Amino acid sequence: MKRILISTDSYKGTLSSKEAGEIINSAFMREGFFDNLVLPLSDGGDGMTEAVREAAGGETVRAEVKGPLFEQVAAEYVRIGKTAVIESSQACGLVRVPENSRDVMNATTYGVGQLILHALSGGAENIILGLGGSATNDGGTGMACALGVKFYGDYPFIPVGRSLENIKRIDMSGLDPRVKRANIIACCDVDNPFFGKNGAAYVFATQKGASKEEVRRLDKGLSHLASLITNVDLKNLPGSGAAGGLGGGIAAFLGGNLKRGFDVISSLVCLEDKIRQFDMVITGEGKTDFQTLSGKLPAGVAAVCKKYSKKCILISGCIEGDISPLFERGISLAYAAAEEVPQKTPDKTEAADALYRTALRAAKEIKADC
C-alpha cells in the first residue's frame, strides 16, 4: 500500500487541521492504508499556533491581553527555542466577538502588540505572526501603541478604525528597542494592499460588521495613515491589507517582513522533506475557490508535490467555481464534502461526518486504482 502524508489546513469554523487530518486518516486506514502521517499545517490563518505546536513541538505560553474591543482576554502562543509563533486572532480575532456585537470601527490590535511584548520579554529573538481572522481595521496602530509608538491628534490617543483620520503626527521614538533587534515575519494568506478598492476595508470590513459608509470611512482612514508613513509604500505593498491593515502596520512600525504564510509555516515544519518521503499527499481546507490559487495552503502543497512528482489529493469542505488551474499546479483528484456551498457553517459533528464519508469514498477509489 502507498505511504500517505495527510496535511490539510483547518476547516474554518468547524475542524482544526489536526482534527481534519485524523478524520481523513481514519477513513483511509479503514481501506487498508496504514502507513500514514498526519502533519497539521497552516498558511498563517486561524489555527496556526495549534498546527505548529502539533507539527513542530514547542511550548504553549499564555498571557492576558486586550481583546478586539479592549476587553481583557486569555491568549496563547507557541515558543520554539528563541522563536515565538503568534496568531493575531488570539488577541483581535473575529471569533472573539459575537456576530451581533461586531464593531470594526472601534476594534483594536493593541493585544497583538502585548503578545509581541510578552514574547520579547521571554527571550524571543524571532517573531512569526499569523494575520488571519481579525475583527479589526486599525492599520496596526493599536499594536504599535502597545509597543511604545505614540499617535497624536490634538492629544496622544490609541487609534481605532473610526479615528484613523484624526492622526496628525506619529512619534516612533518610544518603540521598544527589542523590536528593532528582533526578526519579525508576518504570515499573509492574502496579497491585498493597505487601502483602495482591493484594500483592507473594501474587501474585508463588511464581514467584520461595517456598513457601506463605514467601509468608505475606514478606507479613507487607512489612506490618511499611509500618507503619514514615509518608510514604506503601503499603497503598493502586497499583503499590507491583511488583517485590517495589520500587515502594513507590521512593515511600517516594526520593520517586519511580509511573507506568504504557507512558505513560512511549511519551512518551519519541514514539509518539503516530509513530502519527499511519501508516495501520496492529501490536502484540503474548508472552502476551495479562486482565492485558493493566490497563496492558500492547498495550492502550496500541490506545488511541492508537483516538484517531486507526488500524487496530491484535495479533500475540501466545499468547492466553489472553476478550480481547473489547481490541476495544472499539481492537484491530481479533488473531492468536496458538500455538493454545494452551504448557506451556513455546519456544526462540528456534521462537518466531521461529511469529511469522513468523503475521505472514505476517496480511499475506496484510490485503492481500486492501485
Image: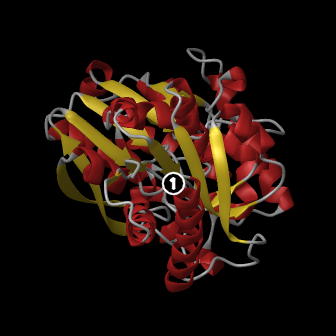
Label 1 environment density (alpha carbons within 10 Å; few <14, some 14–19, many ≥20): many
**Residue 200 seen in the current view:** no
Percent x, y of residue 178: 24, 26
The residue singled out by tag 1 in the image is 108
The correct choice, above or below, for 152 with respect to 17 in the image is above
Q: Residue at x 40, y 64 (%)?
A: 25
Front residue of 51 and 111: 51
Q: Is residue 278 above or below residue 19?
A: above
Q: Is residue 113 above or below residue 305?
A: below
Residue 222 in picture, x, y percent from top left? 69, 38
Percent x, y of residue 92: 47, 57
Residue 95 visible, this orientation: yes
Callout 1: helix, strand or loop? loop
Residue 129 is situated, as x and y percent measured from the top left of the image, at: 40, 40
Return the residue nearer the eye: 252 or 306: 306
Residue sitting nearer the eye, 263 or 272: 272
| Residue under the image location 63 percent in, 35 percent down | 330
Question: How many badges with numbers are in the image?
Answer: 1
Picture residue at 38% right of the left edge, 65% below the top: 32
Q: Is 312 left, or right, of 241 in this rendering?
A: left
144 to the left or right of 194: left
220 left or right of 159?
right
Q: Is residue 332 above or below residue 236?
A: below
Q: Residue furthest top?
A: 231
Where residue 316 sits, quadrant-wise, is: bottom right
Q: Given the image, on which type of amino acid does mark 1 rest?
A: Thr
